[in-house]
Image (spheres, helix red, strand yellow):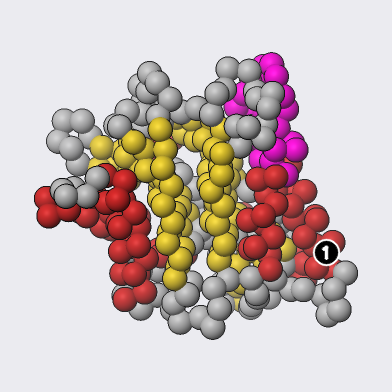
């Protein structure tokens, strides 16, 4: 359920909110870290920037499988391809333009990686999920493939309790529409996996599954930021196998609001909370890689 779609549009923050990103990566029980991430400000690269937008930032987590090459490739190239696809100057409807640019950037990144993968001997079989957030001034645009997730922590002004807003929709082969697409393409779903192997129904890479209905078209959502928002959490499924979204948000808040941590400034507290959350996921038995990216909203 897309929680924020069912809430009234929040009052817009009057000024552009400052952001600070924190990231923590843990290998878990895997032999190698197959995750990758991107944190970058696209404002300068997109000059002349879209009219009426002064800040354009990009955050992403990629959860690789079958190797780390697809995740690393996406981390290096998805935002660059987004810059190529974004129109410049006065574009009319900003929302429509950014969403189309995200769709085009995912398509181009997938095509280019598959071309490179097919040229290898033997061909690379790597794939990756993707969860990315583009921040245009005070509006989030969220694009997702696979089972990584993004959530937003929004505080209730009256009781100072958090509301956890789900910003992304997961894609797995058991979902009706995903399964139907796979079957129409000639594939099948066994034990909750495409051909009994692949756990996700959308990804970048995975060339051997593209003929079976696995696509690289993300769901793209929009969410305006409000003054009551505290942070955005992006993470791979390794975190969410150990935490529910609500538990993860409350874990972070419990540390940043802890009186014992008052000697640290708020940026340092969020940095510590990010690493503590990743450590706790591993301690709870997350065998998968764990990548946690927190975008702190400074007030």
Q: Position of residue 172 (x, y in %)?
A: 56, 62
> Which residue is found at the position 64% from the left and 70% from the top?
68
Residue 140 relative to residue 44: left or right: left
Q: Is residue 185 at all visible to an observer of this figure?
A: no
Q: Nearer the viewer, residue 1 or 58?
A: 58
Q: Please determine whether, in this image, residue 293 is positioned above or below residue 70.
A: above
Find out whether residue 129 is within the magenta segment: no
Residue 74 relative to residue 140: left or right: right
Quadrant of res 175: bottom right
Q: Mark 1 points at which residue?
A: 116
**Label 1 crowd bin: few (<14), some (14–19), many (20+), radius 10 Å:** few
Q: Please determine whether, in this image, residue 210 is positioned above or below residue 229.
A: below
In the image as oriented, which residue stretches furthest toward the left?
Answer: 259
> Which residue is found at the position 77% from the left and 60% from the top?
113
| Element on which disc 1 rests | helix
Q: Is residue 255 at all visible to an observer of this figure?
A: yes
Give the magenta range.
81-102
Residue 249 relative to residue 95: left or right: left
Residue 84 relative to residue 68: left or right: right
> Which residue is found at the position 65% from the left and 25% from the top?
49
Find out whether residue 94 is within the magenta segment: yes
Q: Nearer the viewer, residue 209 or 119?
A: 119
Q: Which of 101 and 210 is in front in this view?
A: 101
> Which residue is found at the position 55% from the left and 23% from the top?
54
Q: Please determine whether, in this image, residue 293 is positioned above or below residue 2.
A: below
Image quarter of the C terminus: top left
Q: Please determine whether, in this image, residue 215 is positioned above or below residue 47.
A: below
Q: Main secondary structure of the magenta part?
A: helix
Q: Where is residue 278 in the image (x, y as percent from the top left)?
A: 37, 65
């Amino acid at each position: 359920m897309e929680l924020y779609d069912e809430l009234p549009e929040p009052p817009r923050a009057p000024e552009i909110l400052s952001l600070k990103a924190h990231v923590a990566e843990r290998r878990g029980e895997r032999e190698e870290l197959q995750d990758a991430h991107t944190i970058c400000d696209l404002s300068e690269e997109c000059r002349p920037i879209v009219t009426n937008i002064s800040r354009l930032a990009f955050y992403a987590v990629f959860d690789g499988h079958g190797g780390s090459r697809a995740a690393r490739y996406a981390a290096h190239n998805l935002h660059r391809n987004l810059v190529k696809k974004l129109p410049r100057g006065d574009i009319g409807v900003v929302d429509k333009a950014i969403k189309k640019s995200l769709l085009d950037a995912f398509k181009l990144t997938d095509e280019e990686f598959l071309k490179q993968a097919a040229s290898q001997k033997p061909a690379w079989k790597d794939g990756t999920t993707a969860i990315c957030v583009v921040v245009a001034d005070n509006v989030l645009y969220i694009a997702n493939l696979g089972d990584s997730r993004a959530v937003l922590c929004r505080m209730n002004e009256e009781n100072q309790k958090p509301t956890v807003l789900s910003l992304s929709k997961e894609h797995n082969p058991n979902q009706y529409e995903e399964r139907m697409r796979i079957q129409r393409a000639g594939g099948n779903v066994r034990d909750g996996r495409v051909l009994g192997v692949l756990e996700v129904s959308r990804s970048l890479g995975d060339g051997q599954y593209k003929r079976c209905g696995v696509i690289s078209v993300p769901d793209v959502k929009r969410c305006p930021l409000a003054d009551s928002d505290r942070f955005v959490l992006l993470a791979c499924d390794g975190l969410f196998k150990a935490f529910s979204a609500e538990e993860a948000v409350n874990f972070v808040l419990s540390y940043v609001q802890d009186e014992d941590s008052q000697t640290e400034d708020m940026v340092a507290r969020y940095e510590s909370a990010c690493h503590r959350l990743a450590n706790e996921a591993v301690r709870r038995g997350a065998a998968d890689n764990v990548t946690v990216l927190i975008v702190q909203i400074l007030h």
